[in-house]
Amino acid sequence: MALTGGGKELPLQGAEAEDRKDGGTTDTSRLESCLDQPMDSSGVHEVIRFLPSPLPTKHYDTDTTEPISCGLQSLEELLSWKRSEANPFNVAAVPLAPREPPLARCLRRTLVSHDMMGGYLDDRFTQGTNAEAPYAFYHWQYIDVFNYFTHNMVTVPPAVWTNAAHKHGVVVLGTFITEWTDGAKVCEAFLKDEESYRAVADKLVQISHCYGFEGWLINIENVLSKVAVKHTPLFLRYLTEQMHERVPGSLVLWYDSVIEDGQLLWQNELNQSNGVFFDACDGLFTNYNWTEEILARMGDYGGVHGRSANVYVGVDVFARGNVVGGKLETNKALELIRKHDFSTAIFAPGWVYESHEDKTDFRKNQDEFWALLSDFLYIHQTALPLPFFSSFCQGFGKAVYWRGQREADGSWFNLSAQESQPLYYRTQLGGQGWLSSRGCPEDAWNGGCSLLLEGLIPAAHTSPVCAKILSLHVPLASKILVSLIYKPSPGIIVSLELKTSNASLCTHVDVQDVKPGGVSPGLEDEGLVSQFTQLCLNVSPAGWTVGCSQLEVQRCTLREVCLSIRRDRAEDTPFTCRVGEIRVLDGSSPQAPLEGVQGLCLYDVVWLRGTFPGSSAPCLHFNATLRWMYPAELARHFRVYWRRLRGPDPRIPPGQLVLVGRAHSNLYRVTELAVPEAPCLLELVVEPVSREGILVPEDHWGRRSLSYAEESAQ
């Protein structure tokens, strides 16, 4: 309810009023079958019927019922969009993390516009998918804004991208685009008057607010009539104001295409011809055919008005047209842009993937590309609370690992599984010495890859090698527990260095190696002993070294995590050190009681006939949506299982838990689960994985039993 200072109720305006008309911010229609299940009942009964799936095909794969992301194709589809019909699986599960410095104080920003092969590829599967050689982005510390670009009229970013970006404090923008003759017709329709352009803006605001991303790139690439171009700045201003009101930290950017008289005439700069659009929104994304002379002229243009950070100079990595740099010379473009103190918009950096036939070498290509740009990029620090953890998973891999053990074979992709990313680089140590940092999928502690440090310490290098791993902004408690899980090569000694906001304080941490069943090193606090025991001792290391240490520190902020590597002999020493996980816990306050999963419900059941993996025999496939309640800030992710309680199935003993998958929100779609023939009783189970690494007891897990039988003959 909106109130004035005197308490008088005001009518709701714009997008908020439309939300209320649409039934409010809570999507109850999707929950009806869930809410029909009594809260005190743990069981659901199903009669098997092989009927066409009732799920909307734009949100669910027609063959498997897997949830998918998609865009909107037409003005009619946009204007008829309703929150109650939105895709619940494409809602971002991760809020935008704060960062240092805040985006508003960043004077030379970096935007990445991801345009790849039409979009909505492997990334359209909101729970991930099997993919032999997917594209992923993980150099988040270098960028400030991420735009997902396709040629759909309305591009809604897939939730997997929004989740990964938000974990690193990166703002996410969708795209609204009109093009050529059809685009001109769309513009004539929605820019004809105030009511029409406000209706479109309200829907764009609602979509952004619903799906949890921060704004829009507006790309009008068609001629506009006098009436339409007159209303365009008004549309931009209204959209920008509404976005700022509804979504904190939001941005609306205009692409350099149409000029003030309605001609489609790319300017490659900010000038008097397109300044009216720049003035009406948060910034301009220029076209790519600029020169240094244009950059210099733009710096002198009075219309910038101290907003040079809001001018994003476009760089096409594919180097199409008469451009500066591009491909592996993109650094030349960035050097000039930074010289003239502008922000940059890097378009289609997926060139590192698309242009190379061997997709398996993708990590190497991407790391080389971003290393070339690194001198002209500015690292921001994601502001995170304790507990801090990262296993450096990049959101894809050749297998899935859990506590150092290979849990599932096969290549996979899910950017929602991406964890806080380290710094990737290669640097010289003097003489023949070198040090590099890269993601490696050949072994991992958790997820799909680990961080591999490798290099050569020359004989003349007498001091320890300091490998910078993470750039952070994590306020520390007065007492912390630090753990490091790693695999060093012979001949080196490894320790952690924690660098804080107090420049005089650099804490050297000699983590003490421990083994299952060992004694907690130097821990006196009973709560810390309990945390340490679960975190470091109840594991099966599989060759990993597990080290923990308790530290008392000044109340300060953790800014960098480094690994100090020294050799144990005075000679040239090649080395590797695989880092599986780093964790920093609050040791100053008692451990809070563990939360349990509440209200697990099951709905949208679809039965199918298929084959079991490795067999040609037909079998019963169960598909359903699970939803539950659990504080999002406490969970790293969830593990979803099933087990047979009664019914025929020689493959699996009764009661044995079988992993279905990992969920990265309180919502999970079970798809193509091969289950025993009817009649049968099985149980679906949800285990929360805590951020601290503390094992959650089984009596805190969520459970829902499912009995099913064949449809009786009439």
Image (tube, rainbow, N blue to C red):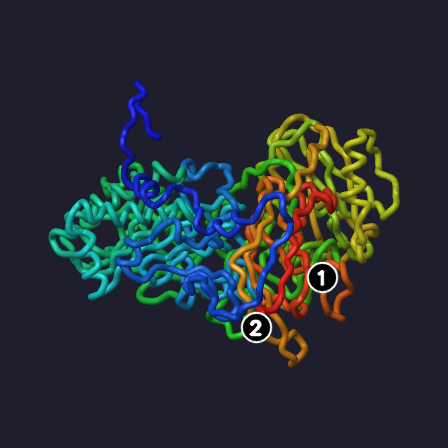
Image spot of residue 134 (x, y percent) = 54, 66
Specify whether 369 is left or right of 119. right
Q: Residue at x 66, y 50 (%)?
A: 703
Residue 368 visible to an observer of this rendering:
no
As drawn, 60 above or below 107: below
Which corner quadrant holds the C terminus?
A: bottom right
**Which quadrant: the N terminus?**
top left
Closer to the camera: disc 2 or disc 1? 2
The residue at the far bottom in this view is 616
* Residue where numbered disc 1 is placed: 644
Residue toward you, 275 or 696: 696
> How many tags in the picture?
2
Q: Is residue 423 left or right of residue 308?
A: right
Q: Residue furthest top?
A: 6
Residue 237, by quadrant, is: top left
Which residue is the extreme one toward the left?
226
Q: Is residue 73 left or right of residue 230?
A: right
Q: Secondary structure at mark 1?
A: strand
Residue at which label 2 appears: 713
Which residue type does callout 1 highlight? Arg
